[in-house]
Image (cartoon, grey):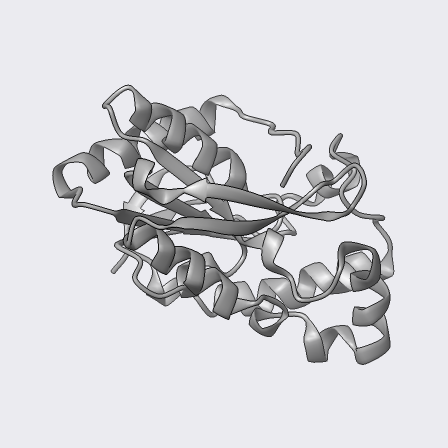
């Protein structure tokens, strides 16, 4: 998202280094990593750290943030969720998976591709053009990112919104109004995200340690 503020901590750097060490021996052409976890768990920060770290190895990795692919406009999403029932609509189907998969396919086939990009200042949905022939690796991050197809390495962060409650209340990024609607949304996202955990190859524990999923 354009204008997003990253809150990169030492734990993100440490986890990123370990993940890069696991990626390098297994890397193949047009490799795709996906990172899932609940809101506030550090998905975007980790994607950024991994992408930056891979540059030192001559690998050009580009993050793809699935939060840019919501079907509803940012200014309309809150009201739309409340109107239709948070427990009924919050989940996988809020994303335009057809658009996500098209961009992934464009990456794998070295095409020039156009992707949505939400400007957090204006809350407009801009369009970003990328020449994927210049990109070696894609890092897909988002609540349900590991659900995408053609992923080579799936990473799941085990932190829940309850463990990051203080972050939601005091986050300097100010992404959402924190009230009953937002907390109900986080609870429903929690239910949906946790269903994806069995798909993971690597788990990041609540203490931000890396473990191999069983």
| Residue 91, percent from left and from top | 61, 70
User: What residue is rendered at 35% in x and 60% in y?
Assistant: 105
How many marks on residues?
A: 0
User: What residue is rendered at 56% in x and 43% in y?
Assistant: 128
Quarter the C terminus occupies? bottom left
Q: Nearer the viewer, residue 12 or 163?
A: 12
Question: Please, is residue 9 above or below residue 165 in the view?
Answer: above
Answer with the quarter of the image where residue 84 lies: bottom right
Answer with the quarter of the image where residue 183 lies: bottom right
> On the rendered structure, is 172 left or right of 177?
left
Question: Please, is residue 130 above or below residue 38 in the view?
Answer: above
> On the rendered structure, is 166 left or right of 93?
right
| Residue 43, percent from left and from top | 50, 43
Q: Is residue 157 visible?
A: no
Q: Nearer the viewer, residue 116 or 156?
A: 116
| Residue 167, percent from left and from top | 70, 38
**Farthest top residue in view:** 56
Q: Nearer the viewer, residue 24 or 3?
A: 3
Quarter the N terminus occupies? top right
User: What residue is rendered at 26% in x and 54% in y?
Assistant: 152
| Residue 66, percent from left and from top | 54, 54
């Amino acid at each position: 998202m354009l204008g997003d503020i990253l809150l990169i901590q030492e734990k993100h750097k440490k986890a990123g280094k370990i993940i890069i060490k696991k990626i390098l021996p297994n890397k193949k052409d047009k490799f795709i990593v996906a990172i899932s976890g609940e809101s506030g768990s550090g998905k975007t920060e980790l994607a950024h750290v991994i992408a930056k770290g891979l540059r030192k190895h001559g690998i050009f990795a580009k993050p793809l943030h699935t939060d840019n692919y919501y079907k509803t406009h940012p200014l309309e999403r809150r009201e739309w969720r409340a109107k239709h029932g948070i427990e009924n609509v919050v989940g996988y189907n809020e994303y335009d998976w057809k658009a996500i998969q098209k961009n992934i396919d464009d990456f794998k086939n070295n095409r020039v591709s156009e992707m949505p990009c939400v400007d957090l200042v204006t809350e407009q949905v801009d369009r970003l053009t990328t020449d994927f022939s210049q990109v070696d690796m894609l890092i897909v991050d988002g609540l349900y990112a590991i659900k995408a197809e053609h992923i080579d390495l799936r990473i799941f962060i085990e932190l829940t919104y309850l463990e990051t409650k203080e972050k939601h209340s005091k986050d300097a990024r100010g992404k959402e109004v924190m009230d009953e609607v937002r907390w109900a949304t986080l609870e429903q996202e929690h239910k949906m995200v946790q269903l994806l955990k069995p798909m993971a190859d690597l788990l990041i524990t609540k203490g931000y340690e890396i473990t191999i999923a069983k």
